[in-house]
Amino acid sequence: MHYRLMIVLACIVILAACSKAVPEAEVDPAEQGAALLVPFKTKLKYELVTSMQAGLDEAIATCNTAAPGIAASLSVDGVVMGRSSHKLRNPANAAPDWVALWFERYLAGQSQPVSVELDDGRHGYIEPIMTQPLCLTCHGQDLQPEVAEKLAQLYPEDQATGFAQGDFRGVFWVEFQAD
């Protein structure tokens, strides 16, 4: 009986030594970056659509105050996110240097999100924003006079007009430590 127990224990030890530990699945930084941006994009779109129903003044106010607040509320635990453009409306939305480097590529026709490794071991992820019909109300070529007036009041150095549907409008970006 003792002999059988020794054989079973020996088999367990041999099997344990031969088995390989299952490595943890590596998280793709591009997938992680895209996932981090989902709540920002979803909430911002919801706020814009809802505010547009309340009127243009509400929609403009949403972009002016709510959008930065949404980004700030989601920039926690080492995650920093925002939106920016090569044609800024609000100077506070200026892109970090690593993001601004990609504007020319997007203007040249690249339309895919980009994941980059940053100098500090963190990761960055960028998704282009292409101008949609809803965007043209405040970013299009022919603005209603009341829209143009309100934008001029809030953003005296506004550069974010003159877009057509499908144009590269800007980017959503996020910096994070990959899991």
Image (cartoon, rainbow, N blue to C red):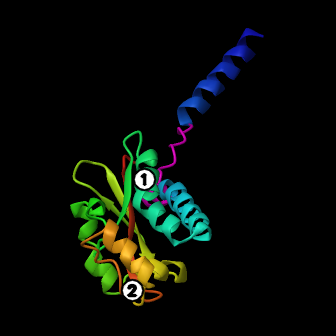
* Apparent side of residue 46 relative to residue 85 in the rendered image (left or right): right
Is residue 33 shown left or right of residue 109?
right
179, 48: nearer the viewer: 48
Q: Is 25 inside the magenta-drawn segment?
A: yes
Q: Residues within 10 Å of mark 2 (few under 14, many from 20)?
A: some
Q: Secondary structure at mark 2?
A: loop
Quadrant of residue 163 within the rendered picture: bottom left
Nearer to the camera, 172 or 21: 172
163 left or right of 118? right
Determine which quarter of the picture holds residue 88.
bottom left
Q: Amino acid at mark 1?
A: Ala
> Where is mark 1, residue-wise?
71
Residue at x-position 51% and y-position 81%: 132
Does residue 55 lie above or below 134 as drawn? Answer: above
Q: Identify whether 80 is placed above or below 108.
A: above
Q: Residue furthest right?
A: 1
Task: Calculate the distance from the C-alpha at mark 2 to the C-alpha at mark 1.
Answer: 24 Å
Does 176 sit above or below residue 63? above
Q: Is residue 140 shown in magenta?
A: no
Place of residue 43 in the rendered image (x, y in percent of width and height, measured from the top left): 55, 58
Magenta stretch secondary structure, dominant: loop
How packed is label 1: few (under 14 Cα within 10 Å), some, or many (20 or more)? many
Which residue is labeled 2 in the image?
Answer: 163
Task: Please state the extent of the stretch shown in magenta in the rendering.
Answer: 19-34
Q: Is residue 89 visible in the rendered structure shown here?
A: no
* Nearest to N terminus: mark 2 or mark 1: 1
